[in-house]
Image (cartoon, helix red, strand yellow):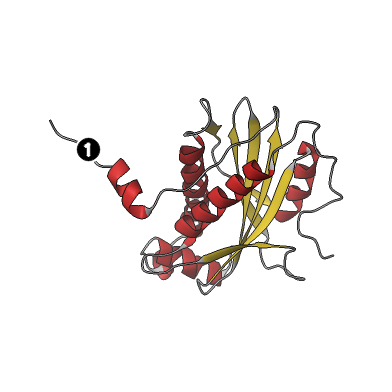
Amino acid sequence: MRASFGAKPAAAPTVGLSERAKTSFDRLVQHALAKALAPEGEQGQVHIAQELPRKPKEKKAVVLTIASPEFRLVLALHVRLDAEGKQHFARLNRVDAAEWSEQAFVDAVSECGNICVGTMNRELGRHFTHVGMSTPNLLEREALAYLDALGAGHRRLYQVSGLGLDFYATLFVSAFVPLDFHAEVETEAEEADAGELEMF
């Protein structure tokens, strides 16, 4: 079975997202994925994909939610809990993979999803008054088919390449009100400035 998002798509909700809002969500996800998945000194390229590989090696997905009165966003980061995946996340965390327990590996994968969605949550907080994110959940890949029941008005599959190991992530966004906003992303310098303490 060759599938990108799972089962037959559900109908989109009656409340819509503007094309500008969809582009903004895409921009925020791509920025967050590139930042969260790239080890120090490396840079990944993120682009929109049409479908997963014919025989995907990713058996699990780290799933997190960002919710607000205006919308609900679910991001699923497809992950490989194999030797290659362990090597990548060990590099990402600057540790020796041989010294990592399986639980430490799983925890690092979940934390990567947490960092990715946390980056998005911070950016979305610039545009929406109340936004909050869930803790990460590690699910079987097949469980993602049930996310179609959300009736997402915007769905995307992203591929992250250039890191020695490709990654995929699926986005679902449902709007509860007509949604239109324009989001840019901070540069690394701006993010660093935002985290500095100013002394008086």
- Name the side, left or right, on which 152 lies relative to 89: right
Percent position (x, y) of residue 33?
52, 56
Q: Residue at x 49, y 46 (%)?
A: 184
Considering only vertical position in the picture, is 65 above or below 109?
above
Q: Residue at x 78, y 49 (%)?
A: 145
Residues 136 and 2: in front is 2
Q: Is residue 158 visible?
A: yes
Residues 72 and 137: in front is 72
Considering only vertical position in the picture, is 194 above or below 36?
above
Residues 113 and 195: in front is 195
Locate the N terminus and report the quarter of the image it occupies: bottom right
What is the quadrant of residue 84 in the picture?
bottom right
Percent position (x, y) of residue 15?
76, 31
Locate the C terminus and report the quarter of the image it occupies: top left
Q: Which residue is mark 1?
A: 197
Considering only vertical position in the picture, is 87 above or below 30?
below
Q: Is residue 106 visible?
A: no
Q: Residue at x 52, y 43 (%)?
A: 183
Kindly identify the amino acid type of the residue bearing the numbered disc 1: Leu
Crowd class of label 1 (few under 14; some 14 to 19; many from 20; radius 10 Å): few
